[in-house]
Image: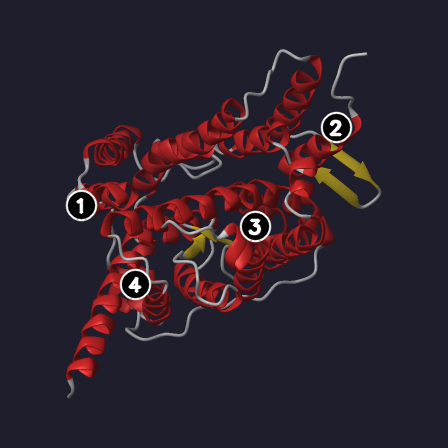
Amino acid sequence: MTTENATEYQFRLRDSIVGAQMLFVAFGALVLVPLLTGLDPNVALFTAGAGTLLFQFITKRKVPVFLASSFAFIAPIIYGVQTWGIAGTLCGLAAAGVLYVILSILISIRGTAILERILPPIVTGPVIMVIGLILAPVAVHMAMGKTGDGSAVLVPEKTALLVSMISLATTIIVSLFGKGILRLIPILCGIIVGYIISIPLGLVDFTPVKQAPWLAVPNFTFPEWNLQAILFILPVAIAPAIEHFGDILAIGSVTGKNYLEDPGINKTLLGDGLATSLASLLGGPPNTTYSEVTGAVALIKIFNPGIMTWAAIFAIILSFVGKVGALLQTIPVPVMGGILVLLFGTIMVVGVNSLIKAQVDLMQPRNMAIVAIIVVFGIGGMTFSAGEFTLKGIGLAGITGVLLNLILPKKDS
């Protein structure tokens, strides 16, 4: 082996090891969404890997980001699965990816100003807030040992609160005081500590893990046409579409490159949209760029997009290990509930912060009306029906916000 070949081999080995580390950083958040929504975690692993590879193809492997399960869609997926089933909900999720594609085309034609006109912070901020707030009861119920809707008790309340609060405390402590790689995986740390505590309390049953095969094809599920699911979920895509800009700016600031110009925000949004639609067509949750992985890139200062290729490959390989999915399904409800108390609250805070950053004056009658109506429509469950057509909750709130922003005059007469 020549010196050049040996050096190349060392770099490839290094990149593969770093890629595995990137998947480890993303793992906790990646599997959390399917575990909460009833989707298959192995499918989520597969679609995260496949989506990342598709994103790299669209952007010509120029951006070192990893795509995986989006928290913004947790509430609509939970509601959708209860209302239309998994197949019908997947149709709406696939349409969300199509919306990204349409936005990328508009940006290619009109520039980013078109999004600033249609989706300013006065609209996206409250929509993000609603996504977090509407999930608050789910988090509390699970933290108290109940099902997400609170209809059944799964774990005695005192035991559940002990486990959930320790999981919550661990997540907060690691996020505040963790060093190096630990600081990037607070969710995973919270789950691990909560899981370990749950074992002696008798909350973990390993029978499914013993029965599961080592190798198994992920349980792919395909969508069924459902117009109501599309109209309900489409407005939810507004928030992660806007967050995509922030994520691309963040990784650009880490690497010192302007990805808004090369490969272009239209290409990155197109890649994100196609990855989301691909995931939904196979039964996985919508994808989004992961800020945890961006933090890891900043920490290790290796900017080669090839490391994300390795992370994607490892995710796909892991998706075919049947015991991984079975083990994830054994995580007790209180552990998940403790994590969600912080997670859903954080989503709400992100929405508030976007309004603060944009210096939106909420005392102006126009702004006050838009924010108030979005929040109350979304959390209150306002419904609009016409025959068999129904629009409600987050979907109605998002569409109403966009229309009010376009219609209401920006200055008092």
Which of disc 1 and disc 3 is earlier in sequence?
A: 3
Question: Residue tagged by mark 1?
Answer: 196
**Which residue corresponds to the image point at 79% horizontal and 44% vertical from the top-left?**
389
Quarter-of-image position of residue 177: top left
Which of disc 2 and disc 1 is earlier in sequence?
A: 1
Q: Residues within 10 Å of mark 2 (few under 14, many from 20)?
A: some
Q: Are marks 3 and 2 in contact (CB under 8 Å)?
A: no
Question: Residue tagged by mark 4?
Answer: 324
Q: What element carries label 1?
A: helix
The quadrant in which the C terminus is found is top right
Q: In this view, does 97 lie above or below 79?
A: below
Which of disc 2 and disc 4 is earlier in sequence?
A: 4
* 44 relative to 125 in the view: left or right: left
Inspect the image, locate mark 4, and give the three-letter code of the amino acid beneath it: Val
Inspect the image, locate mark 1, and give the three-letter code of the amino acid beneath it: Ile
Q: Nearer the viewer, mark 1 or mark 2?
A: 2
Q: Is residue 47 above or below residue 72?
A: below
* Residue 229 visible in the current orientation: yes
Q: Is mark 4 on a helix, strand or loop?
A: helix
Question: Residue tagged by mark 3?
Answer: 81
Quarter-of-image position of residue 366: top right
Q: What element carries label 2?
A: helix
Q: Nearer the viewer, mark 4 or mark 2?
A: 2
The residue closer to the viewer here, 260 or 394, is 260
Q: In the image as oriented, which residue stretches furthest toward the bottom?
A: 1
Quarter-of-image position of residue 306: bottom left
Q: Do the residues labelled 4 and 3 touch (CB within 8 Å)?
A: no
Question: Residue tagged by mark 2?
Answer: 404
**Which residue corresponds to the image point at 22% horizontal and 45% vertical from the top-left?**
195
